[in-house]
Image (spheres, helix red, strand yellow):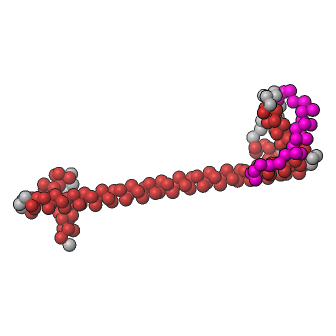
Amino acid sequence: MSNTPVIDPQAWLRLPDRELGYLLLAQFAESQASKIGMPIEKLSIEFMERVRQHVLTLKAESAKLAPVEVALHAVASGDAERAGRLYRQLLLDGAKALVFERFTAQELQRRAASRKKGGQATAESRRAKSKATHIREKAAELESKGRPRREWAGIIAEQFGVSARYVREVLKEKRK
């Protein structure tokens, strides 16, 4: 179990800069101890000093880690207040990034849902056009068989599950 109090980031933001800087170093020391399998309860002053010396030699491998390294370097160099200010800004920037990511994700979901609705409407339109095409084909088939025109609407309506009126409208459009 960790000796560093587990508190939420909002509580971290209420800490004075100096305490926040030391909290950053303590958390880094705990992460280093866990990497080598050292129980947090066994952290010694000598270990903390080795961690502090190690922090002074850190070289960030990515731009994303560079701000954390700068804050750690500040606290390891004895400027816990500056480290706390830097870390606070990192926390605030991270929170803003999370809000932006969440907003962006929600916007993307909304757009995807909108496209889906549009796609469904397009599919419905295609089905309606397809049905009209099938009605016209069936009318042509009935005509080729010599069935009287007045019977077409009833026969086709029954076959396609639509009203005879709809069939007449589709067949009228064909003539135009």
Majority SS type along the magenta span: helix
- Which stretch did the figure color magenta? 40-65
**58 drawn magenta:** yes
Please indicate, yes or no, whether residue 2 appears anywhere in the rendered image: no
Residue drawn at point x = 76 percent, y = 45 percent: 10
Return the x and y of residue 48 as percentages of the image width and height. 89, 35
Question: Residue 50, relative to residue 139: is it above or below?
Answer: above
Eyeballing the image, is 45 above or below 172?
above
In screen coordinates, is 3 left or right of 104?
Answer: right
Horizontal arrangement in the rendering, residue 113 relative to residue 43 (left or right): left
Report the front residue among 115 and 35. Answer: 35
Q: Quadrant of the C terminus?
A: bottom left
User: Is residue 82 shown in magenta?
Assistant: no
Q: At x 70% / y 53%, what residue is drawn?
A: 96
Image quadrant containing the N terminus: top right
Residue 139 at x, y percent in the picture: 14, 60
Counting from the top left corner in percent of width and height, residue 134 is at 21, 57
Q: Identify which residue, 22 or 50, lies in the foreground.
A: 50
- Where residue 24 appears, as percent x and y from the top left, is 83, 42
Residue 129 seen in the current view: yes
**Quadrant of res 46:** top right
